[in-house]
Image (cartoon, helix red, strand yellow):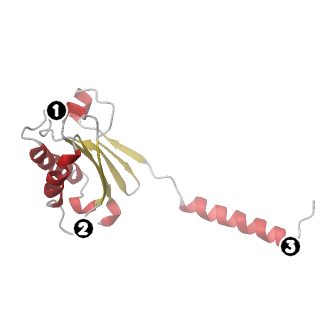
């Protein structure tokens, strides 16, 4: 089969484009980070996973540091503890709250949204990450709130 000049040019151009993009998209290694608490409790998830310049944090509850015990006092105290837990997780990766780009809030009762929001906004100084919030039909440890976030290393 004989190719026309136009077909040959199109074919070579597509090969070059494919080669260019294959060289540009070298696979980034995936890193999994699991705490001793997760290991000791046989929890089936990582605390965080890094893919390229993104750090995905697992959903955080208002548990006391290095514990599976939920802080008392309701949504306000849980929100403060969650935000402190997230700050600590980010610090382990040399990140801050300003590196968060997306958070998802799961509330046991959507009526708690205003109190959660009041505490949440106090943890940001430069900007707010994109965010979703929805009500659930129950959370682990009978928590009032679970918050998962994604941070970007490239925002530094």
For the point 27% across and 61% down, the residue is 99
Figure disc tally:
3
For the point 20% across and 53% down, the residue is 91
Q: Which of the two residues, 104 or 18, is positioned nearer the viewer here?
A: 104
- The residue that label 3 is drawn on is 5
Instruction: Identify the mark nearer the N-term, 1 or 2.
Output: 1
> Where does the image place residue 25, in percent across and percent down from the top left?
53, 58
> Where does the image place residue 56, in percent across and percent down from the top left?
34, 49
Q: Is residue 21 left or right of residue 31?
A: right
State whether residue 156 is above or below residue 86.
below
Image depth: mark 1 or mark 3 in front: 1
Image depth: mark 1 or mark 2 in front: 2
SS for tag 3?
helix
Assess disc 3: are there few (<14), some (14-19) or many (≥20) residues with their C-alpha within 10 Å of its C-alpha: few
- The residue that label 1 is drawn on is 68
Q: Is residue 120 left or right of residue 46?
A: left
Instruction: Identify the mark nearer the N-term, 3 or 2.
Output: 3
Marks 1 and 3, how far apart in space? 69 Å
């Amino acid at each position: 089969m004989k190719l026309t000049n136009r077909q040959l040019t199109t074919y070579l151009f597509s090969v070059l484009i494919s080669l260019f993009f294959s060289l540009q998209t070298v696979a980034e290694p995936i890193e999994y980070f699991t705490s001793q608490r997760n290991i000791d409790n046989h929890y089936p998830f990582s605390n965080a996973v890094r893919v390229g310049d993104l750090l995905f944090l697992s959903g955080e509850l208002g548990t006391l540091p290095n514990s599976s015990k939920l802080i008392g006092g309701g949504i306000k105290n849980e929100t403060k503890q969650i935000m402190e837990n997230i700050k600590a997780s980010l610090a382990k990766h040399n990140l801050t709250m300003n590196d968060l780009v997306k958070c998802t809030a799961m509330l046991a009762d959507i009526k708690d949204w205003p109190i959660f929001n009041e505490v949440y906004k106090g943890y940001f100084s430069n900007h707010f990450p994109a965010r979703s919030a929805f009500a659930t039909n129950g959370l682990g440890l009978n928590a009032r709130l679970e918050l998962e976030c994604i941070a970007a290393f490239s925002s530094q």
